Image (cartoon, coloured by chain):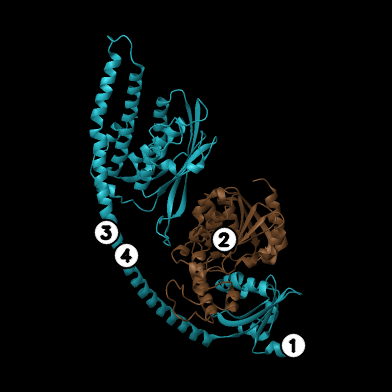
C-alpha cells in the first residue's frame, strides 16, 4: 500500500505538544472518538495519535480485506503500518479491550516501536477452556452475533446481498455510521468474530514491552480472574484493579483512568 | 412511579450510570417474573443474558455516553424462568443525574420475521459470494498459470546458463589457476635463484584468494541442488559445537555465547549448521575487542504474513524468530540491504564476501527470511524467520545432485 494512504486509510489524527508518541487504539464496537475524555490530560506532554481500524469509524472501508482482518494479527498490521508511516519509536500504546491483544501482537512483531503497553480491560481469550475462565461460552458469542444482526437490520445495505470486495458500494448515511461507529455491519460482525473467538494466551509469554493491565471491578467482558491470569502470565506486567465498574473506564471514570496511567508512566520501566 | 406508568404496556426502567436498577415498572417486572420492589437496587446484569451484556458494554454504553441517546436497539431481557424476552428499546442518558432511562416493547413476532429475512439474506449472500469468488478465482488462476509458464521458461533458461557458467568457473578456471599457483611456488622454492622477486609472493597470495572465492561460489551454487530434509533441530548443541570449532579458528579470542537451554524448530540440519557457522564466524571476525566476543541467541514465535510479494494477500502463520546478536563493530544500517549481495563486503578486512548471501539463500530454501539490524560501534543483530506450520517443499527437495558430505570438502576457507 502506498505509504501516504495509510494515514487516510486509518483516519489517523496526530496532535499534542509533546514528542513522546502515545498511540490510542479503540476497541470493538467503537472508534477513536471514545478517547476524547482521556486525551486532554496527555496532549500537553505527548504526541497523541488517534486512528480507526479499517472498517471502523471514518476509515476507508474499501481497504477492507477479509483474509487480513479475519485474524487479530491483521488488525495489528494496521498499528504497525501507522508506526512505520509516522516513523514511531518507543511509543506508549494505549489499547481498549481487544486492542490490548492487538497491541501485544504488534509489539511481539516489532518490539522497538513500543516502550509501554497500557491495556484497558484486556482479555487474551473470552471463551472458557479447561482450567481457564474467560467468562463466556461459545453459544454466548453466537448470541452476540445474532444480537448484532438484529440491530443492523435497519441499515440500508444490510438486507441486500453484498458483492465481494464491496468497493463500489455507496457510502452509508452519516447517521447510520454514527450510530454504531462502524461503516459496515458485515465488517463489524467479522470484527466480533475475530475478537471473541481469538485465543492469544500463547502470545503473552513473549511480550518484552513493560505493560500495565487496567482491570475494572465487575467487568463482565474481562472478569477479574482474567486480569490475574494476564498478570501471572505476561512478563514485566503491572496489574491495577480499578474502582470503575463495567468495561469502559476511559469513558465512565476518565479521572481514575488518567491518574493510574500517569502513575504508571512516572515509574521507571 | 405514577400508577398509570407502573401498569402501562410500555416496559420502563431506569438505571444508574454503572448499571444499578433505580426503578422499574410493574408491567416489566411482572413479565420477568419478579416484583418491582425485588429488583430495585439490584445490578441490571441480573436481567441481561451474556450476549446482551457484551452488546451493552461494547455498543450501547459507548453510544449513550457519547451521544446521550440510542434508538431502536434490539436486545434480550432474561426472566426468572422461561425464554429470554426479545425487546426493542429506546434509551436516554440524563447527564445531570447520571441516570439512564429505558422504554421498550416486546417484539417476539417481529423478531421471528426479521430472523427469516436475515437467514434469506445470508443464503443469498453466500450463493452470490461463492459465485463471484469462484469466477474471480478462475480468472486469477488463468492469469497465474500464464505468468507461471512464462516464469518457468525464463527460470529454466537462466538455470541452464548458470550451470554452464558454474562449470566454467569451478572447473575450467581451476586448472590454469592451479598451474599458476604451482609455478609461483616453484619459483619461490627454487633455492638456485639468488634473489626472489617480491612480486612472486604476491602472486601466491592472490591465487590463494581466488581459490577461496571459487570455493565459496561452488558452495553457493551447490546449495541450489542440495536436498532438503526438514526435521526438528535443537540448535543449542549445534551452536556449542560450532563455538568449539571457532575457538580453533580464532585461538586468541574468547567467545561468550549466551543462549536458551533448549531451542528447537523445523529446519534442514546441515544447512542450518552452515548458516550458524557463517553467522558466528562473522561475529568473531568483526569483533570490537581484540580478545573477546559476546554473542546472544534468542528465540521466540511470532505471527507473520506468509505472502511477501503478492499484494493484498494475507495468511498469518507462525514463524520461529531467531535473533543472533553480537557486540562487534557493527556497520552503517544504510548498507543492510546490500550485505546480502554476492561479494559485497561491508568491512575492508572481510573474507570472501559470500557468507551472508549464502545465509539468505538458506533462509529462502526454508521459506523464511533474514534481516539485519546494526549500529556502528555497538554490534549487529541478525534476525532469522523460519516458518513453523509448513514443511517447505522447495524445488531442491527432489534434487539428488551431490552427496551431502561434500559440503564440507568444498568449504575451503
Q: Nearer the viewer, mark 4 or mark 2?
A: 4
The reply, left or right, for residue B104 in relation to residue B286 is right
Residue A208, compared with residue B129, is above or below; it is: above
- Tag 4 subunit: B
- Tag 3 subunit: B
Q: What residue is disc 3 on?
A: B149
Residue A99: numbered disc: 2
Measured Cα–Cα span from mark 1 to mark 3: 81 Å
Q: Which of the two labelled residues, at mark 4 and mark 1, occupies the earlier sequence position?
A: 1
Residue B327, compared with residue A261, is above or below; it is: above
The reply, left or right, for residue A185 in relation to residue B89 is left
Which residue: 65% across, 61% down?
Answer: A216
* Chain A colour in the picture: brown
Q: Position of residue A50 (x, y in %)?
A: 62, 62
Asked whether residue A266 appears in the rendered view, the answer is: yes
Q: Nearer the viewer, mark 1 or mark 2?
A: 2
Residue B143: numbered disc: 4
* Chain B colour in the picture: cyan
Measured Cα–Cα span from mark 1 to mark 2: 45 Å
Q: What residue is disc 1 on?
A: B2
Measured Cα–Cα span from mark 2 to mark 3: 44 Å
Which residue: 49% across, 62% down?
Answer: A198
Depth order, front residue of B146/B3? B146
Q: Position of residue B338 (x, y in %)?
A: 43, 42
How many neighbours does mark 3 have within 10 angstroms: few (below 14), some (14-19), or many (20 or more)? few
Element assignment for label 4: helix
| Labelled pair 4, 3 in contact (Cβ < 8 Å) | no
Element assignment for label 1: loop
Element assignment for label 2: helix
Measured Cα–Cα span from mark 4 to mark 1: 73 Å
Q: Are marks 4 and 1 on the same chain?
A: yes
Residue A149: numbered disc: none
Amino acid at each position: 500500500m502506498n505509504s501516504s494512504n495509510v494515514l487516510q486509510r486509518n483516519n489517523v489524527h496526530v496532535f499534542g505538544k509533546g514528542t513522546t508518541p502515545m498511540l490510542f487504539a479503540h476497541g470493538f464496537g467503537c472508534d477513536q472518538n471514545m478517547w476524547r475524555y482521556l486525551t486532554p490530560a496527555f496532549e500537553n506532554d505527548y504526541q497523541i495519535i488517534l486512528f480507526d481500524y479499517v472498517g471502523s469509524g471514518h476509515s476507508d472501508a474499501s481497504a477492507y480485506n477479509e483474509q487480513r482482518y479475519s485474524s487479530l494479527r491483521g488488525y495489528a498490521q494496521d498499528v504497525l503500518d501507522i508506526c512505520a508511516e509516522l516513523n514511531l519509536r518507543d511509543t506508549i500504546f494505549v489499547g481498549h479491550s481487544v486492542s490490548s491483544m492487538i497491541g501485544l501482537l504488534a509489539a511481539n512483531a516489532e518490539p522497538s516501536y513500543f516502550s509501554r503497553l497500557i491495556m484497558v480491560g484486556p482479555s487474551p481469550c473470552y471463551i472458557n477452556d479447561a482450567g481457564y475462565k474467560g467468562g463466556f461460552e461459545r453459544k454466548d458469542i453466537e448470541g452476540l452475533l445474532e444480537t448484532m444482526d438484529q440491530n443492523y437490520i435497519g441499515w440500508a445495505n444490510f438486507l441486500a446481498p453484498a458483492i465481494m470486495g464491496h468497493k463500489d458500494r455507496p457510502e452509508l448515511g452519516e447517521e447510520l455510521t454514527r450510530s454504531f461507529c462502524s461503516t459496515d455491519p458485515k465488517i463489524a460482525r467479522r470484527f466480533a468474530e475475530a475478537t471473541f473467538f481469538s485465543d492469544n494466551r500463547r502470545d503473552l509469554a513473549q511480550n518484552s514491552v513493560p505493560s500495565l493491565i487496567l482491570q475494572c471491578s465487575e467487568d463482565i467482558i474481562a472478569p477479574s480472574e482474567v486480569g490475574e491470569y494476564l498478570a501471572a502470565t505476561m512478563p514485566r506486567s503491572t496489574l491495577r484493579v480499578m474502582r470503575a465498574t463495567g468495561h469502559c473506564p476511559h469513558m465512565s471514570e476518565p479521572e481514575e483512568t488518567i491518574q493510574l496511567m500517569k502513575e504508571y508512566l512516572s515509574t521507571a520501566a | 412511579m405514577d400508577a398509570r406508568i407502573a401498569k402501562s404496556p410500555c416496559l420502563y426502567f431506569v438505571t444508574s450510570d454503572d448499571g444499578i436498577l433505580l426503578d422499574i415498572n410493574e408491567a416489566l417486572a411482572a413479565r420477568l417474573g419478579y416484583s418491582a420492589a425485588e429488583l430495585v437496587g439490584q445490578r441490571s446484569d441480573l436481567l441481561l443474558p451474556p450476549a446482551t451484556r457484551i452488546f451493552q458494554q461494547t455498543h450501547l454504553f459507548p453510544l449513550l455516553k457519547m451521544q446521550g441517546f440510542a434508538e431502536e436497539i434490539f436486545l434480550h431481557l432474561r426472566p426468572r424462568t422461561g425464554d429470554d424476552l426479545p425487546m426493542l428499546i429506546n434509551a436516554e442518558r440524563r447527564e445531570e443525574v447520571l441516570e439512564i432511562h429505558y422504554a421498550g416493547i416486546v417484539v417476539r413476532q417481529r423478531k421471528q420475521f426479521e430472523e427469516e429475512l436475515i437467514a434469506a439474506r445470508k443464503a443469498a449472500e453466500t450463493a452470490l459470494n461463492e459465485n463471484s469468488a469462484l469466477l474471480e478465482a478462475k480468472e486469477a488462476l488463468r492469469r497465474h498459470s500464464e505468468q507461471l509458464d512464462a516464469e518457468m521458461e525464463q527460470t529454466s533458461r537462466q538455470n541452464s546458463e548458470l550451470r554452464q557458467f558454474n562449470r566454467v568457473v569451478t572447473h575450467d578456471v581451476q586448472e590454469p589457476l592451479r598451474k599458476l599457483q604451482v609455478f609461483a611456488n616453484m619459483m619461490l622454492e627454487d633455492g638456485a635463484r639468488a634473489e626472489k622477486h617480491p612480486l612472486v609472493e604476491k602472486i601466491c597470495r592472490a591465487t590463494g584468494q581466488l581459490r577461496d572465492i571459487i570455493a565459496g561460489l561452488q558452495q553457493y551454487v551447490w546449495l541450489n541442488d542440495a536436498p532438503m530434509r526438514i526435521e526438528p533441530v535443537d540448535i543449542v548443541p549445534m551452536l556449542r559445537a560450532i563455538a568449539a570449532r571457532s575457538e580453533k579458528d580464532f585461538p586468541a579470542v574468547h567467545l561468550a555465547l549466551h543462549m536458551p537451554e533448549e531451542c528447537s524448530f523445523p529446519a534442514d540440519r546441515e544447512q542450518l549448521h552452515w548458516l550458524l557457522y557463517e553467522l558466528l564466524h562473522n561475529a568473531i571476525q568483526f569483533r570490537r575487542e581484540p580478545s573477546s566476543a559476546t554473542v546472544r541467541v534468542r528465540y521466540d514465535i511470532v505471527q507473520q504474513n506468509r505472502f511477501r510479494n503478492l499484494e493484498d494477500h494475507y495468511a498469518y502463520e507462525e514463524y520461529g524468530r531467531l535473533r543472533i546478536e553480537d557486540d562487534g563493530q557493527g556497520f552503517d544500517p544504510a548498507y543492510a540491504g546490500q550485505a546480502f549481495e554476492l561479494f559485497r563486503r561491508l568491512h575492508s578486512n572481510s573474507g570472501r564476501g559470500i557468507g551472508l548471501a549464502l545465509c539468505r539463500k538458506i533462509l529462502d530454501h526454508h521459506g523464511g527470511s533474514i534481516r539485519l539490524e546494526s549500529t556502528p560501534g555497538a554490534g549487529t543483530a541478525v534476525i532469522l524467520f523460519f516458518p513453523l506450520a509448513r514443511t517447505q517443499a522447495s524445488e531442491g527437495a527432489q534434487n539428488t545432485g551431490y552427496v551431502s558430505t561434500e559440503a564440507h570438502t568444498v568449504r575451503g576457507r
